[in-house]
Image (tube, helix red, strand yellow):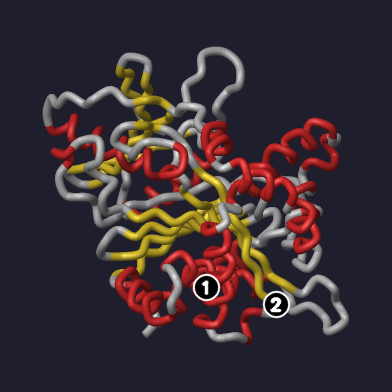
């Protein structure tokens, strides 16, 4: 893929964008989504590629998600830009401290309630329809993206008017969009709901700000709606908000962390032939959503990072939980959508229609 630059132990792959820089960036992200981070030998959790574009270049960063969340990645890229422009000292960071235990110790009642709520979580999942492509085990990722100028402001205004958050609006729109991947459930079906999982940043509960601590401090929650395509976006967003508000108010995100620990134990007991479908069968979600707000993060580690980029592309690997993951980035002037998916589970033409529907609904909010 072109020449390589060796800087100390960091290898930066370099390629030319050619006539279509956006296509080159999309292809680079798609390739890096499947970048392997070896479990043996010296651990290197980062991979870099530069895509030449005219007189400048795009810098792509792939990282093992266990070491960083999206907020830390933005701050790191901002610091790299600042160092590229000239020598600049950066204060040492505390690296990914194990503070989840401290959070549980500070909130023992909420933690106990989270464990007690696991059976109810499993019972509610029985109402959700299973995502398409369960029988297909190929895990390779594909990636598409869309830029929606001005949509960030429209979504913010609509969220305030509806009494919800921007993430609630995005989650509702994703639920409505992915519902088209399968025909509606029959009237007698017990599983009638389409569910989507949203990542939650809980850094404020267990770590210092991004300019002081580098790491990943994430949980998640799940929201669903029966046959959402026949319901207005505002109504679906209010249903999602009721769930997200309850999750934060009662610290039910601890339940997701507990479920992850339990499922990790179960994973070791399940054979290879069943691992590909264990989550999809028992915690069915059609898509994951991860939302990132760029303003305030870009210059967190390096105040001299300069103007934050208007074109910030982002993608997240699908993994075993969902066949589709939507990475939504609010840049301050646009909403950037990066959608990764497993072609073995969701055909590219079906995914293209889904992204077109999602982009049209978010752009058309008034």
Q: What residue sits right under mark 2 in the picture?
A: 226
SS for dot 1: helix
- For the question of whether residue 117 can be seen, the reply is yes
Q: What residue sits right under mark 1 in the picture?
A: 173
Rendering coords of residue 305 (x, y %): 18, 40
Looking at the image, residue 350 sits to the left or right of residue 238; the answer is right
Rendering coords of residue 342 (x, y %): 63, 52
Q: Is residue 231 above or below residue 225?
A: below
SS for dot 2: strand
Whichever of labels 2 and 1 marks the residue nearer the N terminus, that label is: 1
Looking at the image, residue 180 sits to the left or right of residue 57; the answer is right
Asked if marks 2 and 1 touch (Cβ < 8 Å), the reply is no
Which residue sits furthest front? Answer: 109
Rendering coords of residue 293 (x, y %): 35, 55
Q: Return the residue nearer the eye: 155 or 144.
A: 155
- For the question of whether residue 139 can be seen, the reply is no
Looking at the image, residue 77 sits to the left or right of residue 349; the answer is left
Q: Is residue 68 above or below residue 224?
A: above
Q: Quadrant of the C terminus?
A: bottom left
Q: Return the residue nearer the eye: 352 or 162.
A: 162
* Label 1 CA crowd tier, 10 Å (few <14, some 14–19, many 20+): many
Image-quadrant location for residue 288 = bottom right
User: What number is the disc on residue 125?
Assistant: none
At 51% from the left edge and 37% from the top edge, which residue is drawn? 65
Rendering coords of residue 19 (x, y %): 30, 53
């Amino acid at each position: 893929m072109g020449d390589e630059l060796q800087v100390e132990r960091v290898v930066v792959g370099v390629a030319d964008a050619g006539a279509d820089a956006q296509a080159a960036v999309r292809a680079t992200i798609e390739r890096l989504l499947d970048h392997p981070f070896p479990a043996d030998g010296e651990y290197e959790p980062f991979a870099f590629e530069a895509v030449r574009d005219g007189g400048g270049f795009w810098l792509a960063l792939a990282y093992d998600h266990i070491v960083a969340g999206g907020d830390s990645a933005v701050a790191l890229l901002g610091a790299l830009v600042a160092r590229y422009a000239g020598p600049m000292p950066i204060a040492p960071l505390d690296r990914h401290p194990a503070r989840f235990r401290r959070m549980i110790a500070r909130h023992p009642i909420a933690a106990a309630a989270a464990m007690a709520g696991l059976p109810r979580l499993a019972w509610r999942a029985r109402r959700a329809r299973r995502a398409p492509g369960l029988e297909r085990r190929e895990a390779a990722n594909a990636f598409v993206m869309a830029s929606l100028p001005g949509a960030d402001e429209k979504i913010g205004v609509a969220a305030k008017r509806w009494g919800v958050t921007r993430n609630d609006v995005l989650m509702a729109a994703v639920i409505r969009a992915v519902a088209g991947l399968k025909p509606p459930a029959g009237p007698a079906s017990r599983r009638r709901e389409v569910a989507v999982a949203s990542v939650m940043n809980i850094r404020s509960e267990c770590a210092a700000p991004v300019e002081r601590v580098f790491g990943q401090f994430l949980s998640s929650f799940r929201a669903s709606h029966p046959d959402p395509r026949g319901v207005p976006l505002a109504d679906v967003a209010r249903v999602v908000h009721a769930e997200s508000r309850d999750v934060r108010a009662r610290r039910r995100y601890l339940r997701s962390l507990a479920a992850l620990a339990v499922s990790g134990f179960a994973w070791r007991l399940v054979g290879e032939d069943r691992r590909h479908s264990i989550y999809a069968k028992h915690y069915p979600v059609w898509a994951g959503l991860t939302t990132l707000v760029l303003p305030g993060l870009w210059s967190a580690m390096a105040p001299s990072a300069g103007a934050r980029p208007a074109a910030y592309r982002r993608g997240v690997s699908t993994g075993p939980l969902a066949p589709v993951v939507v990475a939504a980035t609010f840049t301050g002037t646009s909403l950037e959508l990066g959608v990764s998916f497993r072609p073995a589970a969701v055909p590219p033409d079906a995914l293209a229609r889904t992204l077109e529907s999602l982009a049209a609904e978010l752009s058309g909010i008034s």
